[in-house]
Amino acid sequence: MKVKHHLQSQLHELEPMPELLRSSELRLQQMTEQLEQLKQLHDHDMRRINDLTAKVVLYYCLISLLRLLKTNYK
């Protein structure tokens, strides 16, 4: 009888587990999707940063060239 009661008690403790598992799986799926979205945003931001960096370098080179031309024509 003790064993039966003990097993019933353990079974009762396990009853909420399937719902907890489903809830955890859903949360994991949501977080996985959010992570993918954040990775895409990060990639987009990195491309934008690279584009802007290239423009800054180009403008710096142009300014340097203009300064050089200005000093040569004085």
Image: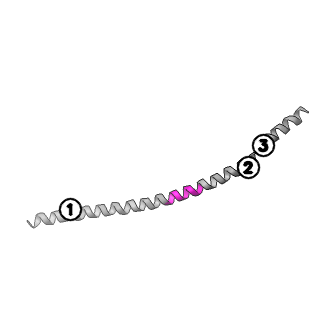
Q: Which residue is mark 1?
A: 64
Q: Residue at x 42, y 59 (%)?
A: 46
Picture coordinates of residue 66, whole percent (x, y): 18, 65
- The quadrant of the rendering that contains the N terminus is top right
Q: Which residue is mark 2?
A: 19
Which of the two discs, 1 and 3, labels the residue nearer the N terminus?
Answer: 3
Considering every residue shown, the one lying at the far top of the view is 2
Which of the two discs, 2 and 1, labels the residue nearer the N terminus?
Answer: 2
Tag 3: Cα neighbours inside 10 Å, few (<14), some, or many (≥20)?
Answer: few
**Residue in front for this viewpoint, 33 or 16:** 16
Q: Residue at x 61, y 55 (%)?
A: 30
Q: Which residue is mark 3?
A: 14
Tag 1: Cα neighbours inside 10 Å, few (<14), some, or many (≥20)?
Answer: few
Q: The residue under label 2 is which amino acid type?
A: Glu
- The rendered magenta stretch, by its main secondary structure, is classed as helix
Q: Is residue 73 above or below residue 31?
A: below
**Residue 31 colored in magenta in the image:** no
| Res 9 quadrant in image | top right
The range drawn in magenta is: 32-40
Tag 2: Cα neighbours inside 10 Å, few (<14), some, or many (≥20)?
Answer: few
Q: Residue at x 55, y 58 (%)?
A: 36
Tell me the SS state at disc 1: helix
Q: The residue under label 3 is which amino acid type?
A: Leu
Picture coordinates of residue 56, whole percent (x, y): 30, 61
Answer with left or right where residue 20 lies relative to residue 37: right
Picture coordinates of residue 54, whole percent (x, y): 33, 62
Q: Residue at x 40, y 62 (%)?
A: 48
CA–CA distance in space, label 1 to label 3: 73 Å
Q: Which mark is residue 2?
A: none
